[in-house]
Amino acid sequence: MKLILSFVAAFIFFFQSDIEALRNSYAKANDSASNTEKFIGIAEKQSGSDAVTLGYKAAAKIMEAKVSKGNRKTLVKTGATSLEAIIKSNPNNAELRLIRLSVQENIPKIVGYRGSLKDDKAFLLSNYSKQNAALKNYIKRFALQSKTITEAERATLK
């Protein structure tokens, strides 16, 4: 029995550290082209097939357009389509909504992928209290640098 519990705990710890690595790398990805490339590399190496991991992989595909010399339009379209499908399957996942909000905040307006900014912001603010401590902290860190979340809205995140 102890062996099974140890295995389950190790699995959860391993999975959680992968998510933390993705979160930390994603939070820094827009700072520079090299950080963007690091995030893309970390996301591509992830073997998880859970919705959040797939969401980060979709965001990496979108961000690849920022540093790629190839067909940027295709990269954005592929990543955005994938992210939208993942969110459609998991509409109540706050981390996926955060990923989409941050992508849409930072993508150039000319691309036209900005339709869910208000909905995602409202969802995050209204469901913030229901999240675990790690995700709350991640949302707060995002809110501090967000262009969409106002000072008054930041103050509600406790």
Image (cartoon, helix red, strand yellow):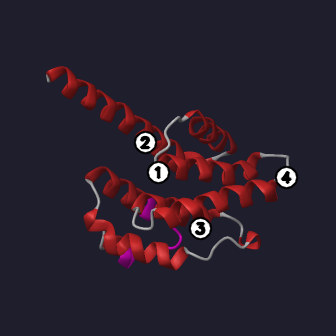
Q: Which residue is mark 3?
A: 105
Q: CA gap, disc 4 to disc 2?
A: 29 Å
The front one of 53 and 102 is 53
Percent of width and height locating residue 96: 47, 59
Asked whether the residues under the numbered discs 2 and 1 touch, taking CB atoms below 8 Å apart as contact, a structural biologist would say yes
Mark 4: amino acid? Asn
Amino acid type, label 2: Ile
The numbered mark, 1 or 3, whose residue comes first in the sequence reads: 1
Q: How far across and how far down the image is residue 31, in percent?
A: 60, 49
Amino acid type, callout 1: Val
C-alpha gap between disc 2 and disc 3: 22 Å
Crowd class of label 3 (few under 14; some 14 to 19; many from 20; radius 10 Å): some
What residue is shown with label 2? 19
Q: Which dot, 1 or 4, sits closer to the camera? A: 1
Q: With respect to residue 70, does 116 lie above or below?
A: below
Measured Cα–Cα span from mark 1 to mark 3: 19 Å
Residue stretch in magenta: 142-153
